[in-house]
Image: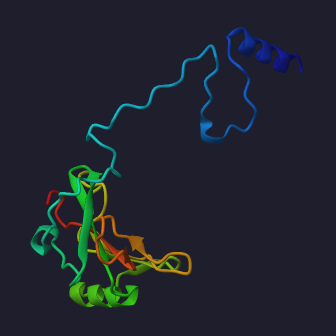
Amino acid sequence: MLAAILVLGGILAAGQTPQPFPNPGGTRPATPSQPPRAAPPPTSQGRPPSAPTTSTDAAPTEATLGVPIYPGAQFITSYNAGRGQRYYIFGSTAPFVDLVTYYRNALKQKGELVYDVPATHEFDVGKYNEDTMAFPPGVTIKDYQSDVSQGFPNPKAGGQPARFPTVIQIVPVSARP
């Protein structure tokens, strides 16, 4: 008991407000004696991995990606994945099962259903080098249509279709497309 009082006294003497336990997130809110913490500096690669490119991106080609693009799929955008990689997002009006069947035949492999709900199927298409890559090369297909969603919204103003039932994510075979 005496030890707890001494610890509490030391904390108060240091100008820190004791915080309840547990502390979700592991951070302390700023107190009047502590200025708010600054945001962490950007990564060495510039923007965070989830930052999209501008909407003026040109659609990549199958030759650039190293894998086929589902016929009729619309290029939505690409993202900086880090370590010189990008990943590319395409929307499709085709059902999830049709896209999985297409990529099974085109890539000559079974792939793997990684989630049942929402249905998500992955195909590995190249060797992953953790020293030079942020993500393994592959094709991921996700079913965005469900009882609670009519699909992935088309980000292009007035774009058709208004929503894509299925989305394709491609991480190119080469690290620097």
Rendered position, 55 above or below 36: below
Measuring from the top left, give residue 86's x and y in whole percent. 24, 57
Q: Is residue 162 left or right of residue 57?
A: right
Which residue shows up at 26% across the image and 55% down it?
133
Q: Residue furthest top?
A: 13
| Left-right relation of 148 to 57 | right
Residue in front for this viewpoint, 18 or 74: 74
Quarter holding the N terminus? top right
Give the vertical position of 23 relative to 59 (above or below). Answer: above
Of the pair 116 and 123, the residue shown nearer to us = 116
Instruction: Kindly give the residue lying farthest to the left in the view shown.
Output: 63
Please provide percent x and percent y for residue 163. 38, 75
Furthest-right residue in this view: 1
Q: Quadrant of residue 72?
A: bottom left
- Left/right placement of residue 100 relative to residue 146 reads left
Q: Name the one closer to the observer, 174 or 51.
A: 51
Image x and y of residue 21, in percent: 75, 35
Q: Quadrant where the C terminus lies?
A: bottom left
Q: Residue at x 72, y 39 (%)?
A: 22
Image spot of residue 94 (x, y percent): 33, 86
Task: Tell me which corner region of the image, top left, top right, bottom left or bottom right, holds residue 66.
Answer: bottom left
